[in-house]
Image (spheres, rainbow, N blue to C red):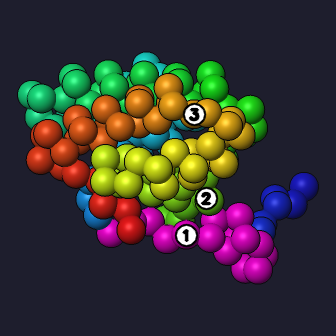
């Protein structure tokens, strides 16, 4: 039996974006992928957050779990995530990082992008969850810069 190998032409279509250079965005993306694939209680995601935030890990980790639950509960369409080891991002992952980076500085833009991502006209509850995650990262000295 031969294994499926995507062609070089398919990879950019499925994973069109490179990983962000910002280490804070990379930390969030890794935890986002782990929780998306393995559940909100994933120990590896928690350990990564502990390493990234030290003793102040609880607030960002708890709020990220709440954000993930809100996204999953509110989305009317699938949110594609790549494997944790992948050096590229899906459109959805790029959108999530962009929304997180804009949540406090450009909430109108973040709201429109989030509405498109999850297929909901009024994504205000989910936007509130995303905004508090962005604030938790910024308060800990790790602001998300995705653009």
The crowd level at tag 2 (other Cα within 10 Å; few <14, some 14-19, many 20+) is many
Quadrant holding the C terminus: bottom left
Mark 2 sits on what residue?
A: 90
Q: Earlier in the sequence, mark 3 or mark 1?
A: 1
Side of 57 where 127 appears, left or right:
right
Please state which of residues 146 and 7 is positioned toward the viewer in this rendering. Answer: 146
Question: In the image, is residue 111 above or below residue 136?
Answer: below
Q: Is residue 2 visible?
A: yes
Q: Which mark is residue 17?
A: 1
The residue lying furthest to the right in this view is: 1
Residue 46 horizontal/vertical position (percent)? 32, 29
Q: Earlier in the sequence, mark 2 or mark 1?
A: 1
Q: Earlier in the sequence, mark 3 or mark 2?
A: 2
Residue at the location (57% across, 52% down)? 113
Residue 17 is inside the magenta segment: yes
Q: Which mark is residue 52?
A: none
The magenta segment: 7-21
Residues at badges 2 and 1 in contact (C-beta under 8 Å)? Answer: yes
Query: Of tags 3 and 1, which is closer to the observer?
Result: 3
Residue 12 horizontal/vertical position (percent)? 67, 74
Residue at the location (63% across, 26% down)? 74
Q: Secondary structure at mark 1?
A: strand
User: Which quarter of the picture shows residue 11?
Assistant: bottom right
Q: Which mark is residue 123?
A: 3
Residue 118 horizontal/vertical position (percent)? 66, 39
The crowd level at tag 3 (other Cα within 10 Å; few <14, some 14-19, many 20+) is many
Side of 133 where 117 appears, left or right:
right
Residues at badges 3 and 1 in contact (C-beta under 8 Å)? Answer: no
User: Which quarter of the picture shows residue 5?
Assistant: bottom right
């Amino acid at each position: 039996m031969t294994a499926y190998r995507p062609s070089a032409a398919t990879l950019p279509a499925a994973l069109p974006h490179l990983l962000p250079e910002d280490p804070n965005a990379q930390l969030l993306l890794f935890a986002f992928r782990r929780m998306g694939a393995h559940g909100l209680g994933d120990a590896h995601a928690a350990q990564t957050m502990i390493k990234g935030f030290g003793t102040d890990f609880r607030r960002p980790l708890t709020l990220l779990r709440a954000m993930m639950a809100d996204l999953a509960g509110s989305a009317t369409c699938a949110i594609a995530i790549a494997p944790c080891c992948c050096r590229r991002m899906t459109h959805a992952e790029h959108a999530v990082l962009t929304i997180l980076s804009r949540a406090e500085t450009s909430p109108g833009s973040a709201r429109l992008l989030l509405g498109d991502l999850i297929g909901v006209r009024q994504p205000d509850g989910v936007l509130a969850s995303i905004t508090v995650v962005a604030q938790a990262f910024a308060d800990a000295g790790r602001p998300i810069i995705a653009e």
